[in-house]
Image (cartoon, grey):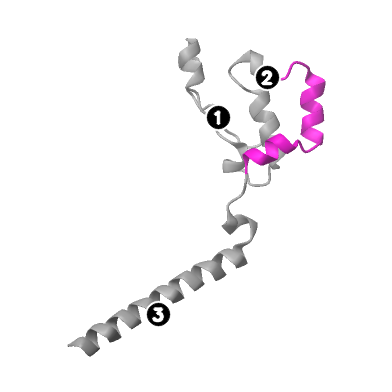
Amino acid sequence: MFTGRLPYGTQVPRARSAAAQHRLKYSSAITYNADVPIWVDGALKKALHPNPDRRYAEVAEFVYDLHHPHKAFMADHALPLIERDPNRFWKGLSAVLGLTVIGLLAYIVRIGGAA
């Protein structure tokens, strides 16, 4: 409902054995809809797990996790620096590129002086 896509794609009907079900890969709802909170995606992943033993035992647990951020789900999705703090990412990248340019200029000056 959040993405308009199936969480395991079209592979589920073909996964008839337990081994085939273990190979199924969950497609995160966040990939298709960035507005989905991280903990909601984690709750969905657990609720839709192919192995029934790894799903929620009670619907109330699922509903609770949908309404309350679960720290375990949030740890699974550590955002990259560019998404957490784009300003810091670009400053760091600029610093690395600047140092590279200075290093290359020093190398060229040294080679030019040797010739």
* Residue assigned mark 3: 102
Residue contact at pointers 3 and 2, CB within 8 angstroms: no
Q: Residue furthest front?
A: 114
Residue 17 location, x and y as percent? Answer: 47, 10
Q: How many marks?
A: 3
Q: Magenta part of the protein: which range?
A: 56-77
- The mark that comes first in sequence, 1 or 3, is 1
Q: Residue at x 40, y 80 (%)?
A: 102
Report the mark closest to the observer, 1 or 3: 3
Query: 80 above or below 105?
Result: above
Amino acid residing under circle 1: Tyr
Q: Residue at x 64, y 14 (%)?
A: 52
* Residue assigned mark 2: 55
Amino acid residing under circle 2: Arg
In the rendering, which numbered label is found on residue 26? 1
Query: 99 above or below 37?
Result: below
The answer to whether any part of residue 48 appears in the image is yes
Q: CA distance from mark 3 to mark 2?
A: 55 Å
Residue 4 location, x and y as percent? Answer: 60, 34
